[in-house]
Image (tube, coloured by chain):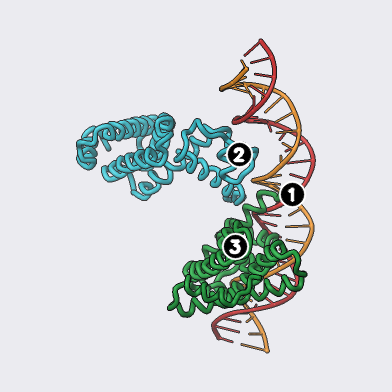
Chain colours: A green, B cyan, C orange, D red
Amino acid sequence: MEKQIDPRTLRTRKLIMDAFIELSTKKDFKDFTIGDITSAATVNRATFYNHFIDKYDLLEKVLRESVMREVLQEVSTHEGINEETIRAIFISIIKFQTSISNQCPRSYEAFTPQIETIFKNELQAFFSEWAQKQWSNKNRIEVETFSVMLSWSLYGAAMHWMQDHTTKPEDYVKQIMHFIKLE
Amino acid sequence: MEKQIDPRTLRTRKLIMDAFIELSTKKDFKDFTIGDITSAATVNRATFYNHFIDKYDLLEKVLRESVMREVLQEVSTHEGINEETIRAIFISIIKFQTSISNQCPRSYEAFTPQIETIFKNELQAFFSEWAQKQWSNKNRIEVETFSVMLSWSLYGAAMHWMQDHTTKPEDYVKQIMHFIKLE
DNA sequence: ACAGATCTATCGCTTAACCAACATAGTGAT
DNA sequence: ATCACTATGTTGGTTAAGCGATAGATCTGT
């Protein structure tokens, strides 16, 4: 019943995304064209449009999948939302942000707003899924509200910490926990 | 008037060859299948047969193109056959042999006979081309004979040197030159 | 304000790669 | 010797990717 995607689409998709990431390390986002990306990916320019709507769509998908792979993947093995989970995610957010800013020094500025949006959406979906399992007695609205608030506050806290590293991350997380009510 | 090859064939060909080289560093030539190669290359097994007859054909082409790229490429800028050219080729043969034996420790033994054949053929073709330009007064047979003898003796000398490194390569090449009659 | 160039996005047609299926051959265990 | 298993090539039908052409958007210098 699984979709079973054609290997060619996966391969081409990856070629394009990798070429995009590679190019981002050298040039600013606005300074390269679709043609630059596809020729670096050894793919025809027209083929690009079988996979992505435009450059921004590509950017969004690259970021989303990076977030999924590098941040939420490793946490998804935890068995519920608790202090440990929160701590792991907090650390992951910071790691991811710094790695992006190192890998794409030229484009980091331009990317941040989309990163923020994607991050919060993914986090929210992640929390929502777990919260539904964990508190099946609560109704949908309550669960969603919890997820939204947690994801926004957590992401905000991470950004706040990144602007001023004085507190040690572990201590900062402890502080965070004071303001989160996990039932 | 140029052939203009479809980029897909080039890409697929490269994927297969790279996967083959990569696999050779880990396993012995006989210990992996066509399927292993193609799945590492993210290519369908049937597609393999659009490019190569079998595993040995692939091996041969990989070696041939490596020889061409890594050895004869850099020498082809020289403007004729002289002591300097001979020296450069001698050094290149040795470099190539050692790099292969390092990159493919598991399969080097099995490869050597084919490497030898390919090497001598390519060398011969290379010399033949230059000799024809250089000595347009000589007839074809003479030129071919010269090329055969030079390629075999040079390759043989290189193999000889590799078994006993006592002489410095530069000195060894000087010795070689005593036995070559360049006009 | 306009002309020339470049980039974007889409289209119909062609082709290389995918796939499932098959026949064949080699290998190993009982 | 026989069976089960795995690897090799091959084939016909299907699909993603390549290509040239095209129309419209965007940029740039004069």
Amino acid type, callout 1: Glu
The image position of residue B171, as x and y in percent, is 20, 40
Q: On the image, which quarter does residue A143 sit in? A: bottom right
Left or right: residue A46 compared with residue A115: right
Q: Residues within 10 Å of mark 3 (few under 14, many from 20)?
A: some
Q: Is residue B44 above or below residue A79?
A: above
**Outermost residue, front side:** A183
- For badge 3, the amino acid type reads Leu
Can I make out residue A39 in this image? no
Q: Which residue is mark 3?
A: A72
Q: Amino acid at mark 2?
A: Phe
- Secondary element under disc 2, as helix, strand or loop, is helix
**Residue A48 visible here:** yes
Q: Of the numbered discs in the image, which one, if any, rests on residue A165? A: none
Subunit that carries the residue with mark 1:
A
Mark 2 = which residue? B48
Residue A82 in percent (x, y) is at 60, 65
Question: In front: B116, or B27?
Answer: B27
Per the image, label 3 sits on a secondary structure element best described as helix
Disc 1 + disc 3, Cβ < 8 Å: no
Chain under disc 2: B
Q: In the rendered image, which residue does mark 1 sit on? A: A2
- The CA span between labels 2 and 3 is 37 Å
Mark whose residue sits in front, 2 or 3: 3
The answer for which chain carries disc 3 is A
Q: Is residue B168 above or below residue C30?
A: below
Query: Looking at the image, which residue is at 37% across and 38% down?
Result: B101
Q: Are marks 1 and 2 on the same chain?
A: no
Give the secondary structure at mark 1: loop
Q: In front: A21, or C13?
A: A21
